[in-house]
Each structure stands twice: as C-alpha cells, then as structure tokens.
Image: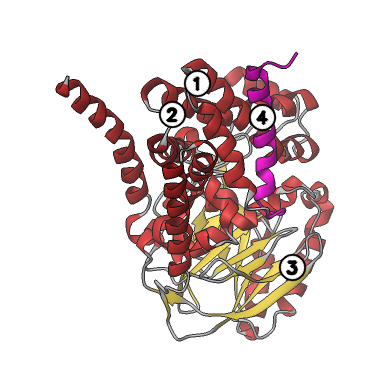
Amino acid sequence: MLTADRIGLLACVAAGAALPLAFAPFGQFWIAPLSYAVLLYLWGGAAPRRAFVLGFAHGAASFLAGTYWIYISVHDFGQAPASLAIALTGGLVAVLALFVGAAGWAAARWFQTTGPLAWFGFLPALFVLTEWFRGWLFTGFGWLSAGYSQTDTWLMAYAPTFGLHGMSWAVLLSAGALVALVAGSSRTRARALAALTVLWGGAWALSDVNWTEPTGRVVRVALAQGAVPQDLKWLPEQLRPTLDLYRELTLQSRGSELVIWPEAAIPAIHDQVAPELDRFRREFEELGAAVMFGILRRDAATDTFQNTLMTLADPPAVYVKRHLVPFGEYFPVPGFVRNWMRLMSLPYVDAEPGAALQPPIELIGEKIAVTICYEDVFGAEQLHYLPEATLLVNVSNDAWFGDSIAPHQHLQIARLRAAEAGRYLLRSTNTGISAIIDPRGRVTGRLPQFEPGVLADAVQPFTGATPYARWGNFPVVIGVVLTLLAQFATKLTMRRGT
C-alpha cells in the first residue's frame, strides 16, 4: 500500500529523473522550475531526516539520469571493469545527491519551510548556497546547476550580471512562486505572480543591455574537428594519419588568421613530434595562419605529463591545464589502489596541473583566455583573465562520452561562460560539438558530431567588463547568506520580545 510518505518519495524521484530534460539536448527549460517546485513543496513541514531523504532522492535521480555518461567514459573508453565503473559513477552520484539532501536537512533543522518567507526566501537561497558549494568543494562539479537549464530563455540575461548562480536563484525563486500558487493563500498567490513578473520581466528588460563592446577589429577564425574515434586515437599507427588530417584541415582554412585544434589533438608527447610540428609551423606561416593546438607535454622536473594548449610558434606560448579531472587526470587514491590499477593496466599516473593564474595567450594581436575540457565549468576561475582578454577559447575531447548527452550539456555550459564574460567563445573539440558562441551565449555556427571538418567564420574581439566579470559570485553568495541570516535575526527579535 502506498502511504503518503512513499508517494512523496516517489514524487521526488520522478521530479529528479525528469530534471535533465530541462537541459541540453532536450531544452525543455520549463521542467526545471516544476521539478524544483515539487522538492520545495515536499520539504514543507518535513522533519530534518525526512527532508534529507527527499533531497537525496531528488538529487540521486537527477544526477543519475543527467550524468550517466560517466560510466561510458570510465568503462567503454577508460577500459575499467564494469564493477569499477559502476562504483565510480554511483559514488559520484551519491556525493552530488548529498548536497541536495544536506540542503533539505538544514532547511528543516534551522529554517522555516512553509509559507511565503520559505518559498520566496529561505528555501531558494539555501538551495543556491549548496549549489555554489558543490561547484568548488572537493574540486567541484557544477554540472546540472539550475541556471544552465535557462540558456534559451530570458533568464540568460542574468548571466553577465549575476552569473550562473544568479540564474539558478531566479529558477529556484520561480519554483517557490509555483509552490505559492498551489499552496498559498489568495494574497500569497498575488505575491507569487508579482515575483514571477519581476523575475522574468527584469530579465527581459536586461536582454538588450550591452555590457561589453567590440574593439572594432574583425578576426577570421577556423576550428578544426578531426573526429578521430577515441578507441583509435592513441594507437601508434594512428599518429601519422592524425598529423596528416590536421595539416589538411588547416590547409582548408586558408584565409583564417587563427586556427584552433582540439584538446590533445596530436596523440603524442610534444618532444616526440617537435620536428614535424616545426615543419608545419613554417608551412602555415606562409599561409598567414596562427595555430593553437592541444598536446601533452612531459614535465622533466617531476617526471609527469601536462595537458597543454600551445601555439605553433618559435618559441611557443603555452597554457597548462590547471583544474584536473579526478580519476581522469589524477587519482586521489591510496598507494595500494594505485598499485592495483597499474597491475590491471589501468591509467594510474597523475598529470601535473598548471599555475592557477596563467595570463592570456597573446596571439594575432589579441589576448586569448584559454580553458581545456571541463575547466569551462568553473566560471569564477576564469575571471582573472578579464577584462584583459578579448577572446575566449575552449578546447575539449568529448569523445570520451560517446554519443551521449554529455557533449550537448558541455556546449550549453560553454554558452553561459561566453555570456558571463561578454566575449566570443571559440570551442574546438575532437568529435564535437565544435562551435562559435557569441557574447550573448548564442551559437552562431557549429559542426556535426563525429564528422571531420572545419568551421570558419569572422568574429569580433570584445573589450570591457560585465558586472559578473567585476564581482564574480560575491553578490549572489552574499545575497543568499543575508537571506538566510534574516531567519535567525527574526527568531532573535521574537525571543527578545517575549
């Protein structure tokens, strides 16, 4: 027999499982506030333990449905045993769900969970605060943050002003307003409609505001997508065809000032192919093309490797990836586990991260802010580039996730980074989705997945700073903390009054 508690738990699981439909590639943005509204409604009046269970169930369902592709990368391409891939995927999903569960527990333990103050104040603020923690705690994993679901709505106008978490706050406030429309009094429903009007109307009003401006220069760029399958990429016999492929794609880009190859486009250590790359440099200089390319570099001092983006120049400018992927580029495990991984012929050697505050790369008269792979999930870590940088470049190898939803989600994340910075973002990937994104986060050109090709276009470098570039996440974090502190101030005032 289904009790009320079980029905509530099933509702949370269903709402959580539906949440990824709000994100790319599905784009059903309206599902996000509905999904969160179910959670906020069920948190109302729940005991701390019950609120934790409901939040954990919602989080586990959403992250399992939305990040199942972790299993593909670990098992299908990482060659890990299925049991290990399931354990790593399940472990990450559980950790991410703990943040949602913790928000529910804290809400029930210390805050009001029913009524207008809860729906418009404490619950949305607490959810956004834990989402912010999730974005950096334990190296951070900001995937499926609420704001990403709104890249094709008016709420995208909040990206350059308040960033991702400002958009997330707007989504959660919308969810709270939906709860108020269902469970509130007539007066509360009127307030909910007013809140929705202010939230969405304010975003609409901001949608035509330009926070940055073009420098007046036009740059011809080209993105090279080799589409080399991940299971073939690192075979020794594939090196020569890969070199020839990217040479040919670059030659097809004749007339472009800047050509960008993907992350680790050349499947070798830099020293192994230095003579060949030097020959390419001389050939491409005759075309007038500057090339940026991803390649691994050995760090002689530490006898480790680094994931880099270099310029094809003498000497090359180099960016070293600084935010590494746990269990992909480094392994936070005890020594005995590392020894087992070595015996099982699994990857076990840690990459060496680059410095945290590397300057933009100066090329073709522009200053280019670089990120590699999922570094573009961490918007605050890129703010040191601004306002100096005039272009953004992200290179990635999303072939690790096969034909899943991950590359589409990753492109959506990149769109928000472009809007936050008010800059064009050039995104070159191995198998897709390579794209050019304008300063409002709109995709102006893209290449089909799993097909080699070149995406060429003219873009404008931009100057100036958006409010988010100036202040980062501080306004939102301070705002949610003050909202939560208001609860304790109210309680203290009531106690003094009695």
**SS at mark 2?**
loop
Across and down, in percent, residue 154 comes to: 53, 63
Picture disc at residue 447: 3
Binning the other alpha carbons within 10 Å of mark 2 as few (below 14), some (14 to 19) or many (20 upward) gives: many
* Distance between the alpha carbons at the discs numbered 2 and 3: 47 Å
* Distance between the alpha carbons at the discs numbered 4 and 2: 18 Å
Binning the other alpha carbons within 10 Å of mark 1 as few (below 14), some (14 to 19) or many (20 upward) gives: some
Residue wearing tag 2: 113
Residue wearing tag 1: 46
Dot 4 or dot 2: first in sequence order is: 4
In this view, 386 is above or below 479: below
Q: Mark 2 or mark 3: which is in front?
A: 2
Q: In the displayed structure, does residue 53 sit left or right of residue 111?
A: right
Q: Is residue 141 visible?
A: yes
Dot 2 or dot 3: first in sequence order is: 2
- Which residues make up the magenta segment? 1-27
In this view, 180 is above or below 445: above
Dot 1 or dot 3: first in sequence order is: 1
User: Looking at the image, do the residues carrying marks 4 and 2 touch, with CB atoms under 8 Å apart?
Assistant: no
* Distance between the alpha carbons at the discs numbered 1 and 3: 49 Å
Q: In the displayed structure, does residue 228 sit left or right of residue 95?
A: right
Residue that appears at 62% across and 64% down? 427
Q: Name the kind of residue labelled 1 in the image.
A: Ala
Q: Nearer the viewer, residue 60 or 470?
A: 60
Q: Mark 3 or mark 4: which is in front?
A: 4
**Overall secondary structure of the magenta section:** helix
Dot 1 or dot 4: first in sequence order is: 4
Q: Quadrant of the C terminus?
A: top left
